[in-house]
């Protein structure tokens, strides 16, 4: 939409027109301030954990499992060299036996959330679909962080005025 | 030809005085927008837009993302 707006402005005589194509979603993913009636609303971007275990497709599952567990996690996001989400290794996948790669053990194409979506909505989705965690990505699929269901439910509860 | 820019370029241009325009529907703008942005929906970018924007200054337009 912004690309069409930029072209239209140029056709109307504006000489220096720039299209911030990654837009509001990218701005919020970076944790930058916003204005508006919902500016302080928790979202996937603000609640997601940023420091999460990642690995590459070709890594040994055994090595990944040891590293992930040592870090106190039970999930690892499989990414490529551009940090694009390729798959997810949750507890079941991490527990697989044998000398296999992360790429062959992972759940490919996992559901992802966009950074700007309100946390109340995501908490409901995660409860309904019984999702323990979901990667949060840019529209291009780049990993921003991992939204943990407990964190989402806690933030949604606090938002609704419940005790913290 | 409009120039596609990233976040850092956008921040630099904003700091240098660029005009920031969100083209999403009003509800989405009202809820959350970039600091200092004005709201001009895509369908309202017409010859009268000069009343809201200065043609001699840079303009940055944005929506949610490129998807």
Image (cartoon, coloured by chain):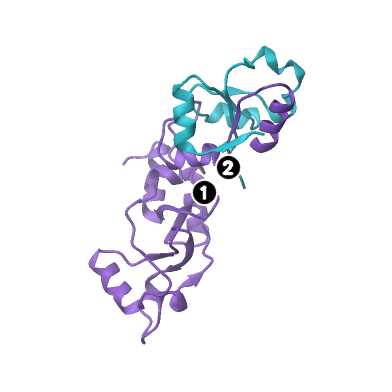
Is the residue B10 above or below the residue A86 in the image? above
User: Dot 1 corresponds to which residue?
Assistant: A114
Chain letter, colour cyan in render: B
Chain letter, colour purple in render: A
Residue B41: give its label: none
- Residue positioned 37% across, 54% down in the render: A150
Image coordinates of residue A159 in percent, x first then y, are 41, 38
User: Dot 2 corresponds to which residue?
Assistant: B65
Q: Quadrant of residue B37?
A: top right
**In screen coordinates, is B19 left or right of A119?**
right
Which corner quadrant holds the N terminus of chain B?
top right
Image coordinates of residue B43 in percent, x first then y, are 74, 28
Image coordinates of residue A70 in percent, x first then y, are 23, 68
Callout in the foreground (2, 1): 2
Q: Nearer the viewer, residue B33 or A5?
A: A5
Q: Are marks 2 and 1 in contact (CB under 8 Å)?
A: yes
């Amino acid at each position: 939409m912004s690309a069409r707006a930029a072209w239209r402005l140029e056709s109307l005589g504006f000489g220096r027109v720039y299209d911030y194509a990654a837009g509001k979603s990218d701005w919020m993913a970076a944790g930058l301030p916003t204005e508006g009636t919902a500016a302080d609303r928790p979202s996937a971007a603000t609640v997601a954990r940023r420091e999460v275990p990642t690995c590459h497709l070709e890594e040994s599952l055994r090595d990944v499992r040891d590293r992930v567990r040592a870090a106190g996690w039970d999930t690892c996001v499989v990414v490529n060299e551009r940090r694009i989400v390729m798959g997810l290794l949750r507890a079941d996948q991490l527990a697989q036996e044998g000398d296999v790669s992360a790429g062959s053990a992972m759940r490919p194409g996992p559901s992802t959330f966009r950074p700007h979506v309100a946390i109340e909505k995501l908490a409901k989705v995660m409860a309904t679909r019984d999702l323990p965690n979901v990667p949060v990505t840019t529209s291009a699929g780049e990993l921003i962080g991992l939204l943990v269901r407990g964190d989402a439910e806690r933030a949604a509860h606090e938002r609704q005025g419940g005790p913290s | 030809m409009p120039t596609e820019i990233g976040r850092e370029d956008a921040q630099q241009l904003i700091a240098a005085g660029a005009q920031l325009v969100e083209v999403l529907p009003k509800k989405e703008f009202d809820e959350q927008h970039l600091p200092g942005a004005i709201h001009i929906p895509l369908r309202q970018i017409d010859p009268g837009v000069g009343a809201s924007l200065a043609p001699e200054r840079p303009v940055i337009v944005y929506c949610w993302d490129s998807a």
